[in-house]
Amino acid sequence: MRLALSSNEDFKPSVRVAVAMSVVLLAHEQFPDRAKTAVSILRYGDTEITAILDRDNAGKRVSDFLSDVQDAPIVAGMDDVSSCDELIVGIAPIGGGFEDSWRPDVRAALERGCNVTSGLHYFLAEDEEFRSLADEHDCELWDVREPPTDLTVSEGVAADVDAEIVLTVGTDCSVGKMTATRELYEAARDRGVDCGFIPTGQTGIMIEQWGLPVDRVVSDFAAGAVEQMIRERGDDHDYLFIEGQGSIVHPAYSGVTCAILHGAMADKLVLCHEAGREAIHGYEDVSLPPLSSYVERYEDLAQPVHETSVVAGALNTRGIETDDAAHAAVADYADAIDAPATDPIRFGVDDALEAIL
Amino acid sequence: MRLALSSNEDFKPSVRVAVAMSVVLLAHEQFPDRAKTAVSILRYGDTEITAILDRDNAGKRVSDFLSDVQDAPIVAGMDDVSSCDELIVGIAPIGGGFEDSWRPDVRAALERGCNVTSGLHYFLAEDEEFRSLADEHDCELWDVREPPTDLTVSEGVAADVDAEIVLTVGTDCSVGKMTATRELYEAARDRGVDCGFIPTGQTGIMIEQWGLPVDRVVSDFAAGAVEQMIRERGDDHDYLFIEGQGSIVHPAYSGVTCAILHGAMADKLVLCHEAGREAIHGYEDVSLPPLSSYVERYEDLAQPVHETSVVAGALNTRGIETDDAAHAAVADYADAIDAPATDPIRFGVDDALEAIL
């Protein structure tokens, strides 16, 4: 999981070189439903996960909750972990703050000589205690969300690369954009399609070991950061799958969404949604508008910069018990957005890929 | 121009306390048409401007170009300036970089003991030579665009303040949003309306001596920065006039625009445009969509978070020679956006205010 490197010396995204052998994921009180970073690393990372830290679920296993990712024991804290080279903070709360109840585990990890990786807005390397422990025990603190300092504004040229650009967009945060993007990318790759994955958030960057945290860059440079990544990789592939962020009607994050939409100059959009979601997560006063209005809104907003259309949908049906009911929800969703749809995890992405490739 | 202070100790926007007596504006090769910061300070600042630095126009005066702002001589460089307490970088190029051809003037100012203020993305205080000269000569370097470090995400509550919120939005950058906002604010205040001005960019912050540079904050926090300013001042006034930024279809800056639109939760929008503008400035391949589509796009994008409507328009007619032709252009613009319109500088804002108050 630690081998990818930027090929261009002028381009310095977040990137790591050390190879971690056994990784522990911190997800206290939030595994699995509100621990999307942890779950994605279990699913897409290629490193062995030694344990999950979640004091509420200690004694259980990942497989008690999830059947389609690698298994690992869940324990209460670092004291119960036998082997660890790296601790990854695997939860991403609204606001990106650091919970002080996590401090003993981060401290214990550093005291044992483990590296610590985090995608929080709060940078561990700027925490005096962590910085000092890391120095003392020769550990690395990797703040995935810390962007390079040499970013600039978009030139509006992402569409000039050779690759066809496919961007996931969403009805809200945490509906499965990263998962849909990664599933589409891996399935296309498995079919022999020459394609690349462009991460824009902390989880995608941890998995890809490369990328720029678009939500953390200076707002004037957010579109430029997306464009920079696309220019870096866009001529090497036939397709680029870009991980979207947030939602165009999110009270806090819509700016990031809009910057990615215009910066990416996508040729095709995949609209992601979670079945049953009726209001913006964490902003329950804000109801989601009708699904069809998202299609119009994204296409209409993109159009003056680069014409695009929603060609497929991804519906997260994790809240639906039976496959039959999930199939019905996917069919309804496809009708609502007038495009082929699937749940990438539950039903695969074949139909969506047909519409994309 | 240096007296305003935040009333809330928990809130630390960019703010200054020193009182400058005579100010020089750096606007090399760009005065007046591409020096919007300089022109706005001439128009709205309450400090005497001693000189404009513009080597292309040395020997002329401000009044040779502009009749409705304070007059000042234009000179080639600091060597031709007799009195100066503060040098302000009065140009804001795309990308916000520092031109090295300005260095001799900044250096000369610091060597004479003048403070230097800049709204560039490039922070003068991080420039080794300037930092060292400022220390040596006991000068202050004020980087207006450097945001505080304690910002966070929007809670989606700006609409809860007592004030009615009026936001300017635009068809492009540099069409006159700051000017329209300031003219509306000053005219409303002159009528006895209890109102406040919320700046979001470097020029507005320099004039108001308070505010957060929304285009410079972490993109996840851009909406939150707007909300924070509105919460700080919104219960003290009946109306708040919020300075918008960019355009919702700008290839580089749309994310900032979108963050302000949703963060401000505006009750009323004023759509700003420059007569004759046909493509995005600096992105000539991107044609402006029809004017009426902006009305729909802004209203439709805002609606899921907070319903709003475009109630007035501001048209910058500086490129039109005669008042008759300008009147005709304003009338056409009002028709196109289906709302009362004016050129705030040329014709005042009475009709627009009627639609707002």
Image (cartoon, coloured by chain):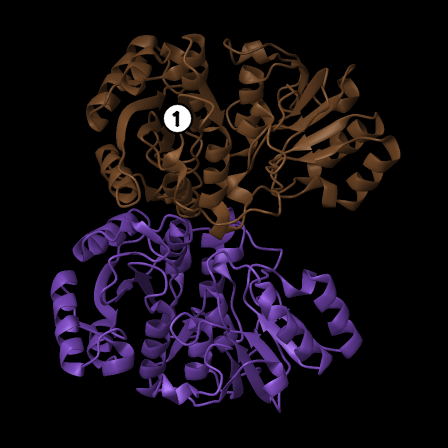
Chain colours: A brown, B purple
Q: Is residue B134 left or right of residue B197?
A: right
Q: Is residue A34 above or below residue B246?
A: above
Q: Residue, x 22% and y 38% (percent of image)?
A: A296
Q: Is residue B233 above or below residue A7?
A: below
Q: Is residue A131 above or below residue B240?
A: above
Residue B238 visible to the viewer: no
Q: Position of residue A212 (x, y in %)?
A: 55, 37
Q: Residue, x 36% and y 14% (percent of image)?
A: A349
Label 1 SS: loop
Please tell me in which quadrant of the rendered image residue A271 appears: top left
Residue A150 visible to the viewer: yes
For badge 1, the amino acid type reads: Ala
Q: Quadrant of the C terminus of chain B?
A: bottom left
Q: Position of residue B15 (x, y in %)?
A: 59, 72
Label 1: few (<14), some (14–19) or many (≥20) C-alpha neighbours in 10 Å: many
Residue marked by disc 1: A163
Disc 1: host chain: A
